[in-house]
Image: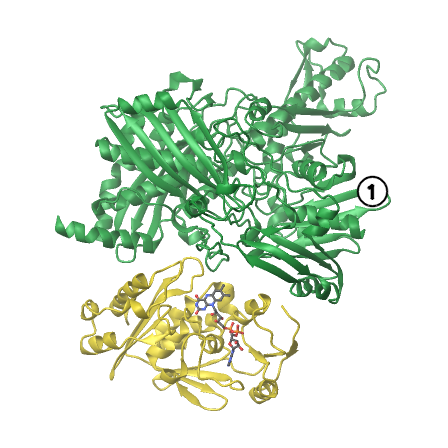
Chain colours: A yellow, B green
């Protein structure tokens, strides 16, 4: 990696100040994405601002919701009694990210800020209608994800926490890339009294997206059969050496049906 | 002594340091004043090399030197040699274009080394390497066999128009053609053997050093065969005489063939150390491993089998294209010829076989031997073809195999493709494997899976391989530019402990244990008093190294010969001490006795006397107790056996899981059953990897698309079932231990077993053949394509 300066501020305010002071500065959370990128010399920040001491980790159960600090690791979410009670599908999703080492370093804030099109958390945030809180504002998940690796975050904006409303039932089904084990297709289904939300990661050319046709069908009838005939246009899907667009489109249906069947 | 000698599952001595993180690998080795090399590689598949502006790199902080191909050429540095010459059908030699250490004139694959930057730190070297301005003039490239052979394809080497390295054949074509003409049935199959990237856990590394006072060079390298590297690099590349060149291959973290070859980086660090008079270290990054370690497999074949009306094989005709990559790696030419086509008889008494092989240059990483080397390609072809033949003749898959097996009373058996098998019992391994796999009970498991919505299939492969390579005169006549004997030196120390110096090299095989067990068995010395030394040309007299499952069959045999000499000399000393005649002295379990008396002397008595020769037959016998032996094998060894795979396919996603795997192998005499089991399991893991997961993919222009762990699927624990391993051995008849070899059987026998199971699982979809890897999207497409046909029926 290229040389860079390193700072470890003791508060969110100081971290924001450091990021605002230098357009080439970059926040560091678990480093599970940023460090490999630095090692491959694909990124050359002037300053790396480590968020480790900003006090952003922790899980709080609210009335009908759970709030997770941005620096909370995937392992902590997976193991949390609160998350398992309120949104078991979210705990299961966190427990299926990467491997043990990655889960003990990688954070929810880092994952959402990075918005990898094959990452898992974006599907949960979008399907559950999460609110992403930053040092500046609260952003609805529907407004947060803006295409692959692109979010509503501004340069000097740090995610501080994420609040997930508790669904009546939810489930996440992930079809793993056999090599990277990221999602080739991941479908998060969440049923709320007001209706069903379905978010798809891994598959779409524009990153994570909501599947309107499935949401409509499932809101009317929450059963796998209800979406058996719902298709996903292959034209909107990614294609690479691991999966064609047609295959991805097919898997969206399979994973969605399995998620509905398993939702609890 | 059964508990520590031959046949005992002694725990691996070497694992203590490996499991404690105390191994000593090349990258752990540091020399005073050491510099670091970073190699700038081509990111172009094919381009003419214009000017390389090194000024900015040379001015970069910490940089000591920058060298290009031109700098090496100016000093008369040779290209990397190829160790095997194949001749064309017409008798002319293969095309053997130069393989410069650093590219000159052109770059020919992504990863081709272009320049080296040497600096105080790794980081500085890498920083500076980015500042090299390289002028490339892109040329059209082709990484695939068909594309490189297409009319008008750009030549990888200007002097090899058409990209054909050789056009070779073996067998009696006329006899085969005649047999086909009279056959009741002909079965034809086109298949591909997928290209693989070895991915040893330890990336390659090399440290070069030079002592200007003595003129001695040292190379520490991740090699399976340090003496071979000394020979090739010293004699052909850098022109350093052996007495001034020491090559050390310390602990090596996996090779699988990829660390046999002499690589450019070894020559670069050694040469640069001499020029700079300082040690130079290079360590591959994982990305570099993907684009610079020799790849494996990559064949396209057409196979035809002629049968009589009863399903007896009459003749086999095979035509194969083999990818050599951009340059000839050390042993590349022999892999798709003498390690492949000679294996096409398999375990069957097919009377006539003809095979032709075209080797092709492409804009891809050089391809060479990878665990199994040629034999997995032959086995996949044959065992898939036999399954297709069974299906198309209506004969049961197991029955057609039995009907064509070489019978037990036919040994030694001369195949129509050069090899002569010494021993085997293919019915025994088949029966044992079918029993262990509960083959008979399979249909109920298929039905149970069906009830769960899964498609279950079972596949069998009855395979054979040739290893323990190899008789020097034979391989010499076939084009090898080396002998393939092995050397052992056994040193019995004054107090009776033993050091074994072996020319074999252990990089995961457990030699320090197995070889010690041989010494324990033969000399009666306790295991903890036996040390096995390998991997250092200054400590070991000579060696050809470890590949082709040869270490025990060839290296172990050399040890036996050396120990025979120790015992013979010991008997003379014992006879002197016990005042008996040599003929009356017997040696057993570490003790010399005189027949018919109660006189005895231990090996320690004898060794002490040998080194303190006060009462000693000094006129007739030299002091000391140390012997060296070279063993040149009389034949290949022929392990074989039967692998049975059971798979389940999820028809909705196409995901295939191997749910049961049984291997029953004939590896000859088993020295350490636990190590054999581990070797077979590791090989099977790689075989399942090839069958279901692994694939080196290039785009049409020659960019490597599967160039990292994000895109190249290595098998992981959760891809593998518990693997049941059994042995059912016949003894090798021509080496003193009766051993055959177990390092590669797993990777050779398993891929067709898995693929036969996959095809069986999909039998209702009317699929005849599936090429590897059987990835989920590929299986899903087959199911999709099969569906309408099913519905229409
Ligand atoms: C081997 C491996 C396997 C993986 N497998 C998966 C997988 O299966 N599924 C999956 O979803 N992910 C996977 N990941 C990615 C992993 O989940 C990462 O942890 C995650 O993508 C990034 O989180 P991080 O905390 O490591 O962030 P970092 O790498 O530290 O940062 C990532 C980016 O986010 C920014 N950032 C970090 N925190 C904040 C914040 N609070 N506010 C604003 N910006 C911020 C950083 O500046 C940087 O640009 C894998 C990673 C590895 C190495």
Q: Is residue B471 above or below residue B512?
A: above
Find the residue positioned furthest to the front.
Answer: B152
Q: Which residue is mark 1?
A: B215
Relative side of A80 to B447, left or right: right
Name the foreground residue: B563 vs A215.
A215
Disc 1, SS: loop
Residue at 58 percent across and 56 percent down: it is: B42
The image shows residue B394 at horizontal and vertical percentages of 21, 32
Q: Is residue B643 visible?
A: no
Does B380 appear above or below B639?
below
Viewer-closest of B559 and B268: B268
Q: Position of residue A49 (x, y in %)?
A: 60, 80
Q: Chain of mark 1?
A: B
The answer, for residue B393, to whether it is visible in the render is: yes
Q: Residue furthest bottom?
A: A136
> Image quadrant of residue B486?
top right
How many marks overall?
Answer: 1
The residue shown at (28%, 54%) is B781
Relative horizontal placement of residue B600, taking residue A214 as reference (left or right): right
Establish if A258 lies above or below B397: below
On the image, which quarter does residue B191 sit in? top left
Residue drawn 59% across the image and 22% down it: B473
| Nearer-the-camera pick, B579 or B454 | B454
Q: Where, quadrant-wise, is the C terminus of chain A in this rendering?
A: bottom left
Q: Who is closer to the viewer here, B505 or B475?
A: B475
Residue B592 at x, y percent in the picture: 69, 18
Which quarter of the rendering shows the N terminus of chain A? bottom right
Circle 1 residues within 10 Å: few <14, some 14–19, many ≥20: few
């Amino acid at each position: 990696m290229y040389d860079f300066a390193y700072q470890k501020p003791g508060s969110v305010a100081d971290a924001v100040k450091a990021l605002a002071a230098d357009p080439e500065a970059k926040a560091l959370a678990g480093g599970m994405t940023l460090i490999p990128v630095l090692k491959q010399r694909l990124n050359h920040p002037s300053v790396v601002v480590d968020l480790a001491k900003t006090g952003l980790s922790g899980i709080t159960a609210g009335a009908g919701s759970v709030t997770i600090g941005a620096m909370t690791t995937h392992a902590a979410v997976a193991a949390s009694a609160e998350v398992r009670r309120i949104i078991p599908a979210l705990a299961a999703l966190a427990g299926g990210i990467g491997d043990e080492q990655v889960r003990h370093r990688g954070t929810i804030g880092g994952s959402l800020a990075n918005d990898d099109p094959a990452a898992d958390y974006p599907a949960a945030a979008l399907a559950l209608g999460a609110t992403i809180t930053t040092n500046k504002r609260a952003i609805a998940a529907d407004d947060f994800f803006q295409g692959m690796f692109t979010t509503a975050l501004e340069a000097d904006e740090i995610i501080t926490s994420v609040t997930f409303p508790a669904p009546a039932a939810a489930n996440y089904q992930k079809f793993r890339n056999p090599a990277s084990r990221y999602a080739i297709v991941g479908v998060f289904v969440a049923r709320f009294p007001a209706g069903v939300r379905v978010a798809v990661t891994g598959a779409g050319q524009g990153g994570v997206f909501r599947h309107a046709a499935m949401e409509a069908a499932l809101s009317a009838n929450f059963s796998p059969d209800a979406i058996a005939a719902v298709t996903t246009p292959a034209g909107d899907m990614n294609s690479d050496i691991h999966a064609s667009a047609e295959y991805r489109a097919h898997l969206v249906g399979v994973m969605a049906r399995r998620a509905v069947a398993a939702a609890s | 002594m059964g508990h520590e000698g031959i046949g005992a599952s002694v725990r691996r001595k070497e694992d203590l340091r490996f499991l404690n993180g105390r191994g000593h690998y090349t990258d752990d080795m540091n020399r005073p004043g050491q510099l670091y090399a970073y190699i700038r590689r081509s990111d172009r598949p094919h381009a003419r090399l214009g000017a390389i502006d090194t000024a900015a790199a040379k001015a970069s902080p910490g940089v000591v030197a920058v060298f290009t191909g031109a700098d090496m050429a100016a000093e008369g540095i040779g290209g990397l040699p190829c160790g095997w010459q194949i001749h064309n059908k017409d008798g002319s030699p293969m095309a053997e274009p130069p393989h410069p250490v650093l590219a000159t004139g052109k770059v020919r694959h992504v990863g081709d080394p272009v320049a080296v930057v040497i600096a105080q730190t790794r980081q500085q070297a890498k920083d500076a390497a980015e500042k090299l301005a390289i002028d490339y003039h892109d040329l059209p490239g082709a990484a695939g066999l068909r594309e490189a052979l297409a009319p008008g394809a750009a030549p990888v080497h200007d002097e090899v128009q058409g990209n054909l390295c050789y056009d070779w054949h073996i067998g009696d074509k006329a006899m085969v053609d005649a047999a086909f003409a009279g056959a009741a049935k002909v079965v034809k199959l086109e298949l591909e053997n997928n290209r693989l990237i070895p991915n040893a856990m330890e990336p390659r590394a090399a440290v070069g050093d030079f002592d200007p006072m003595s003129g001695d060079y040292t190379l520490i390298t991740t090699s399976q065969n340090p003496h071979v590297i000394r020979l090739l690099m010293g004699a052909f590349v850098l022109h350093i005489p052996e007495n001034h060149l020491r090559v050390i291959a310390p602990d090596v973290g996996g090779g699988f063939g990829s660390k046999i070859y002499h690589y450019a980086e070894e020559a670069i660090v050694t040469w640069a150390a001499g020029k700079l008079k300082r040690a130079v270290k290079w360590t591959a990054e994982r990305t570099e491993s993907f684009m610079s370690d020799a790849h494996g497999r990559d064949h396209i074949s057409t196979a035809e089998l002629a049968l009589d009306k009863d399903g007896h094989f009459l003749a086999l005709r095979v035509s194969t294209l083999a990818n050599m990559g951009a340059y000839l790696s050390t042993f590349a030419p022999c892999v798709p010829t003498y390690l492949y086509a000679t294996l096409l008889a398999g375990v069957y008494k097919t009377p006539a076989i003809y095979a032709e092989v075209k080797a092709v240059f492409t804009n891809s990483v050089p391809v060479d031997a990878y665990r199994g080397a040629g034999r997995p390609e032959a086995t996949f072809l044959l065992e898939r073809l036999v399954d297709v033949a069974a299906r198309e003749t209506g004969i049961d898959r197991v029955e057609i195999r039995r009907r064509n097996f070489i019978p037990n009373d036919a040994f030694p058996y001369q195949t129509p493709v050069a090899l002569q098998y010494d021993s085997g019992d293919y019915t025994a391994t088949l029966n044992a494997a079918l029993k262990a796999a509960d083959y008979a009970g399979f249909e109920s498991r298929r039905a149970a899976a069906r009830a769960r919505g899964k498609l279950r299939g079972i596949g069998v492969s009855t395979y054979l391989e040739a290893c323990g390579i190899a008789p020097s005169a034979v391989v010499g006549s076939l084009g090898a530019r080396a002998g393939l004997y092995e050397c052992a030196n056994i040193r019995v120390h004054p107090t009776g402990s033993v050091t074994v110096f072996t020319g074999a090299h252990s990089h995961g095989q457990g030699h320090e244990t197995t070889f010690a067990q041989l010494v324990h068995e033969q000399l009666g010395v306790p295991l903890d008093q036996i040390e096995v030394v390998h991997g250092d040309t200054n400590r070991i007299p000579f060696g050809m190294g470890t590949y082709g499952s040869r270490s025990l069959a060839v290296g172990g045999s050399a040890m036996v010969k050396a120990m025979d000499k120790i015992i013979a000399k010991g008997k003379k000393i014992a006879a002197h001490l016990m005042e008996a005649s040599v003929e009356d002295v017997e040696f057993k379990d570490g003790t010399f006795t005189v027949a018919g008396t109660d006189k005895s002397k231990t090996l320690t008595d004898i060794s002490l006397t040998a080194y303190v020769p006060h009462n000693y037959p000094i006129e007739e016998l030299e002091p000391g107790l140390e012997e060296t032996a070279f063993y040149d094998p009389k034949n290949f060894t022929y392990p074989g056996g039967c692998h049975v795979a059971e798979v389940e396919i999820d028809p909705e996603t196409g995901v295939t899981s191997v749910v049961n795997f049984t291997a029953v192998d004939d590896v000859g005499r088993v020295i350490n059953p636990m190590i054999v089991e581990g070797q077979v399991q590791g090989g099977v893991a790689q075989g399942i990897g090839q069958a279901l997961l692994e694939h080196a993919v290039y785009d049409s222009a020659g960019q490597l698309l599967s160039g990292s762990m994000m895109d190249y699927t290595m098998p992981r624990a959760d891809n593998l079932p518990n693997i049941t391993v059994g042995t059912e051995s016949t003894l090798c008849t021509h080496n003193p231990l009766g051993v055959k070899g177990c390092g590669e059987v797993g990777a050779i026998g398993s891929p067709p077993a898995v693929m036969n199971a996959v095809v069986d699982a999909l039998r209702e979809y009317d699929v005849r053949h599936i090429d590897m890897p059987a990835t989920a999207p590929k299986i899903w497409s087959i199911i999709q394509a099969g569906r309408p046909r099913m519905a229409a029926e």
